[in-house]
Image: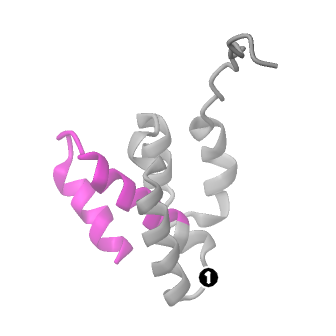
Amino acid sequence: MRQIWVWAALWLGGCEIPPDVKSQIACTTICTCFGGSSPSVEACTNECVEEGDFAVVPEDCFECIQTHANQCATLEDDCEALCVRPEPPQEDIPDGGMR
């Protein structure tokens, strides 16, 4: 299954990859690398896609994951820094005078 998504991405080439396809490609690669057996890879991929986090990752993160489809041993080390999204700043929420 992973090969289908990689080929689809290569076929799309310079075209903008839709977020749902981007998420499917990234999740399939990550779950294949770290998910273990086939049934758990499928469950992992489905859960990952449903969460939708990889649909909005920076382009350099997505490209790194995509290029590591056959390089699982270095995926985390090479891509983690590109994929970490900073937490939004915590703003003080006024309590409206209630204590």
Quarter-of-image position of residue 98: top right
Quarter-of-image position of residue 16: top left
SS state under label 1: loop
**Vertical order, 84 against 86 (above or below):** below
| Residue kind at label 1, given as amino acid type | Gly
> Which residue is at a point 36% across and 61% down the rendered structure image?
24
**Vertical order, 30 against 13 (above or below):** below
Q: Which residue is mark 1?
A: 36
Q: Nearer the viewer, residue 70 or 80?
A: 80
* Residue 79, position as x, y percentages in the image: 60, 45
Position of the N terminus, as image quadrant, is bottom left
> Which residue is at a point 38% across and 72% down the rendered structure image?
2
Residue numbers of the magenta segment: 1-30
Q: Magenta stretch containing residue 19, yes or no?
A: yes
**Vertical order, 65 against 43 (above or below):** above
**Dot 1 crowding, Cα within 10 Å, few <14, some 14–19, many 20+:** few
Magenta region, mostly helix, strand or loop?
helix
**40 horizontally vs 49: left or right:** right
* Residue 12, position as x, y percentages in the image: 18, 50
> Which residue is at a point 49% across and 62% down the rendered structure image?
48
